[in-house]
Amino acid sequence: MSIDYEINRSFVLTVVAVNEVALDKGIRLPRQSTATVSIRVSDVNESPYFDPNPKVIRLQEGIQAESEITIFTAQDPDRFEQQSLRYSTLSDPANWLRIDPLSGHITTIAVLDRESPFVQDNIYTAMFLVIDSGIPSASSTGTLQILLLDINDNAPEVFPPEAEMCEKPENNGINITALDADMDPNAGPFSFELPLQPSDVRKNWTITRLSGEYAQLSLKIDFLESGIYQIPIVITDSGDMPLSNTSYLRVKVCQCDHNGDCTDQERIMTAGLSTGAIISLLLCIITLLILVLLFVMWMKRKDTERLAKQLLIDPEEDVRDNILKYDEEGGGEEDQVEHMNNSLKDDPLF
């Protein structure tokens, strides 16, 4: 039994001491004696606690954001202290929840999805922290488990996503099923059918339901050229509000050997390029060649213009340039005559 200040603040104990061995003859004292012990309990700050912990609630998936889903509060054992409690989020893997720090009200901040990878066995687990205002403060954690109930919010998809078939199938079809992330009764049984458009789908192919989970796709015609075909298949589930989805089965039709194995895989992979992809590739190549050609023509034009400018220089400008250079080297005839006259004056003959 633990001692709790909030239950008992003091204790009175009676202690009895007994001598196990008999006293000697002649000693007239009793074999036992008693004493009273008074114990006073000192108060310490105890941690608050969530109750219940863990708390389990049931919710339907798909609840929108800003929806209040529960109140998760703690109790403080120190009821005589009147301490305040504050709450915070300790672990919320999908970031779906928000707790009010004072009241403990929990509100969604995102849509709850049962198919989330953070949900294990339909249960989403979050942890919260409570701390009191004592000195020193004390805290504890609480776990909230949300059991998410399934709704029909996922459409089925074809499985497997691709298959192989011979050009001459010889009554051999492709068995397919559907994958649905929802649980029963929002999943199977499924219905399988081919769409009305494009028209060549129903012209070349047929689909037969084998059971509520499986169907078989087979050729209507006796021969189909090798290649890769994307076959649209409309699959509908069995939910209260059934969901339909058109998913595509990638079928490789090929030439086969006597064992039924494809023998022209490389040609089929080449054929896998659609006509639009081939046209786009050719247009890119042609555009690149045109750009290269235009660049070469532009460079040649620039070279031609440079040569033309050199040939069209004005001859008078050349002569003027030569005269200026001649002046710089020593002057003309007039300058030379004047120089001779000056020499004669300086050196008289007689």
Image (cartoon, rainbow, N blue to C red):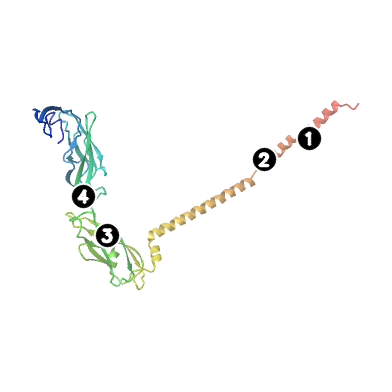
Q: Is residue 284 visible?
A: yes
> Which amino acid is tagged 3?
Val
Quarter containing the C terminus: top right
Pointer 1 local density, CA inside 10 Å: few below 14, some 14–19, many at least 20: few
Choose the circle earlier in sequence order: 1 or 2.
2
Residue for point 81% across, 32% down: 337
Q: CA distance from mark 2 to mark 4?
A: 96 Å
Q: Which mark is residue 158?
A: 3
Mark 3–mark 2 CB contact (< 8 Å): no
Identify residue for label 4: 122
Choose the circle earlier in sequence order: 3 or 4.
4
Pointer 3 local density, CA inside 10 Å: few below 14, some 14–19, many at least 20: many
Nearest the eye: 227 or 285: 227
Residue 189 sits in quarter: bottom left
| Mark toward the viewer: 3 or 1 | 3
Choose the circle earlier in sequence order: 4 or 1.
4
